[in-house]
Amino acid sequence: AQTVTQSQPEMSVQEAETVTLSCTYDTSENNYYLFWYKQPPSRQMILVIRQEAYKQQNATENRFSVNFQKAAKSFSLKISDSQLGDTAMYFCAFMKPWGTGGATNKLIFGTGTLLAVQP
Amino acid sequence: SAVISQKPSRDICQRGTSLTIQCQVDSQVTMMFWYRQQPGQSLTLIATANQGSEATYESGFVIDKFPISRPNLTFSTLTVSNMSPEDSSIYLCSAEWVDTEAFFGQGTRLTVV
């Protein structure tokens, strides 16, 4: 079974600075997807970034980038130039691709990291 | 992407009653799921809502407690039955196409008193 671990329950960063959120996972699969989702106080789950395991290049989305280390099963999120609106709970998530058997496409979430951006 | 409308957004219910939560997607999707998020916790999958057939439940969740319907490719409901205070949580629906990320509704905050 797949597991996702986020070892930082809470983090704090000053506005405009850079912060890195950690995520490790365990799987025997070779192909899979990894995601970072953000959940602000509004409760809406918002996709931040997505990484396909077969891609060696790290995904980037504006101020958000990942450091994907497949051999180490590590998937950290870097937020540059932090903004007050980045304050939220961040969840790392794992998903097997379609057709890999069982209940595919369900997301397995980590426990989350609460990020507070300080003015 | 998809727009997912979930309602109600919040409700306060008496123990022993039932609440049905609706999830409407603005386009046909392949998969729909229901999650529970207990206070301060991560998301736990309740079940996969299958179009035209019985939902597939995860360990620890049963149909009698959480009946789910999915009559078509854009709509699903989750009922929380015979509620107790332990059912107080946020309930979220999500939708996916093949090999895409999940899109989420805004969640339903349920308080059982």
Image (tube, coloured by chain):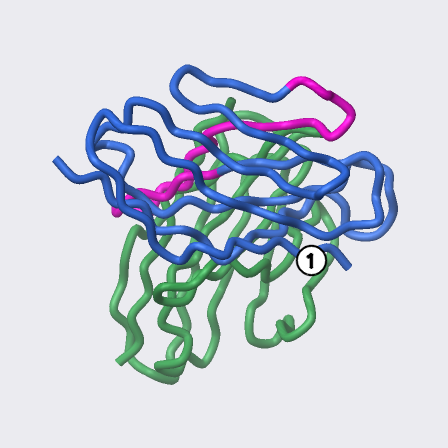
Amino acid type indicated by mark 1: Ala
Q: Nearer the viewer, residue B90 or A110?
A: A110
Residue at 64% in and 75% down: B60
The x, y position of residue A65, in whole percent, is 49, 24
Instruction: Indicate the quadrant containing the C terminus of chain A: top left, top right, bottom left or bottom right.
Output: top left
Q: Is residue B82 above or below residue A34?
A: below
B30 to the left or right of B67:
right
Judged from this view, the residue extending furthest toward the left is: A119
Residue A29 at what x, y percent from top left? 83, 44
Name the quadrant containing residue B69: bottom right
Q: Which chain is green?
A: B
Helix, strand or loop at label 1? It is loop
Answer few, some or many: residues within 10 Å of disc 1's Cα (few below 14, many 20 plus, some between 14 and 19): many
| Subunit bearing disc 1 | B
Circle 1 residue? B55
Q: Which residue sits at x=78%, y=25%? A: A54
Q: Is residue A91 above or below residue A119?
A: below
The residue at the point 68 percent across, 34 percent down is A69
Chain A's colour is blue
Q: Is residue A54 magenta?
A: yes
| Magenta region | A37-57
Q: Is residue B99 above or below residue B67?
A: above
Q: Which quarter of the rendering shows the N terminus of chain A?
A: bottom right
